[in-house]
Amino acid sequence: MEARDPGKVRPPFWLLAELTYRCPLHCVFCSNPVDHARHGDEMDTANWKRVLGEARALGAVQLGFSGGEPLLRDDLEELVAHARGLGFYTNLITSGVGLTRACAKALKAAGLDHIQLSFQDSTRELNDFLSSTKTFDLKAKVAGIIKDEGYPMVLNCVMHRFNLQHVGRIIEMAERMGADFLELANTQYYGWAWLNRAALMPTAAELREAEAVVDTHRARLAGRMKVIWVSPDYADAKPKPCMAGWGAVFMVVAPDGLAMPCHSARMLPGPPLPDLRSMPVREAWYDSEAFNRYRGQAWMSPTCSGCEERHHDFGGCRCQAYLLTGDAAATDPVCTKSAHRGRIDEILDAATLRSREVPEQPLRFVPGAARDAGLVFRSDQNSL
Ligand code: FES
């Protein structure tokens, strides 16, 4: 990551439009807030169009339509067409549920540039278990539709203790499906993944073995399919440059119109998040207290402000610091210089102990399996 002038606020480059928290899947690692059912009021089409226009005028170029499942919005095609007309490069981030051939064609005609399709695993059993839906076969069909319709395709798979040993098969599946990119996203522990972290957490040895498999395939696939291995947070000695810095590159807009520097920011204490139903995007980005709170370096603890790495990691992740220490301005506990690193090591040690209890039978989508594996599925009923 490049060093950046901390005093200069540039316009957002990425806008992630979380159109809805509604989703047909119930993934155990979902990054939506665990109280998502309480934030039910979605912005209407006119407000979304205005927000997109203001963000583009500010300089944003990349646009992701996300959720929840964005295909549940009746106005998705209209929003894609509007965004394309504004000059955005448009991405659809989807579970695949609802992406019929007719829908893929209509979105293409509206100007959609790119599709990211999620899988939970390379096996039907684990894919369906982790999402608590019978969707593996549907996703495989949707991957074919995406390719047939000429879209560039990213397959995304969230990685954790239950599927790391399948990483080679996941890569081969993506290759068979003709993916242009495969994102192997090690679980980030927010939202539902935070609730399920003890069950999802792999050991350092499992991660090392999986990464070695990835390296082997990556060399074999060079020039054909790009394989992205998103580093696991807790197993690293250095924090990640979360969101490429707070309020530096990304603006996330929640379904109800709250503007956020990251997808988890609504659970942080502190100043209210700007509401784009009543505040222009420019004001939210440049002037709101929430976006300015962790910009630059003035907020950093002496541990961070005196560390050379601050130019590269921008202080790590504020949400991770808050979840693990109760203080969003604390040094990210993943950092070995943090006074709280012991908390991370305890969690990793617990994962090593637990690895001796991995179920011998593959997990299946049957009643009771989630409870036996120590998992809570995302659902409106479970919403906290
Ligand atoms: Fe919120 Fe990292 S996820 S700052």
Image (spheres, rainbow, N blue to C red):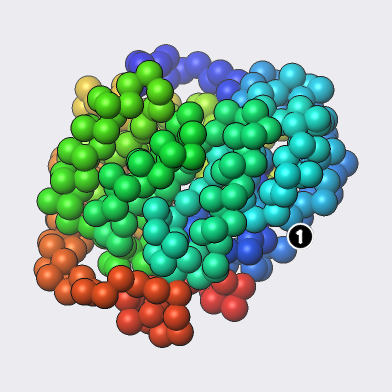
Few, some or many residues within 10 Å of mark 1 (<14, 14–19, 20+)? few
Residue 381 horizontal side relative to residue 102, left or right: left
Q: Amino acid at mark 1?
A: Asp
Report which residue position mark 1 lands on: 41
User: Which residue is drawn at the image coordinates 42% and 19% (left, top)?
Assistant: 6
Image spot of residue 121 (x, y percent): 40, 55
Q: Nearer the viewer, residue 163 or 18?
A: 163
Image height of 370 relative to 79, above or below: below
Q: Nearer the viewer, residue 148 or 168?
A: 148
User: Which residue is drawn at the image coordinates 38% and 18% (left, top)?
Assistant: 223
Asked whether the viewer can see residue 207, the reply is yes
Figure quadrant of residue 301: top left
Image spot of residue 277 (x, y percent): 79, 45
Q: SS for tag 1?
A: loop
Q: Nearer the viewer, residue 336 or 198?
A: 198
Asked whether the viewer can see residue 279, the reply is no
Image height of 123 relative to 173, above or below: below
Q: Residue furthest bottom?
A: 368
Residue 149 horizontal side relative to residue 337, left or right: right
Image spot of residue 184 (x, y percent): 37, 42
Image height of 13 relative to 102, above or below: above
User: Which residue is drawn at the image coordinates 64% and 41% (left, top)?
Assistant: 145
On the rendered image, what quadrant is the C terminus found in?
bottom right
Q: Nearer the viewer, residue 366 or 370?
A: 366
On the rendered image, what quadrant is the N terminus found in?
top left
Q: Residue furthest right?
A: 46
Q: Is label 1's Cβ within 8 Å of ligand 1? A: no
User: Which residue is drawn at the image coordinates 36% and 33% (left, top)?
Assistant: 228
Figure quadrant of residue 127: bottom left
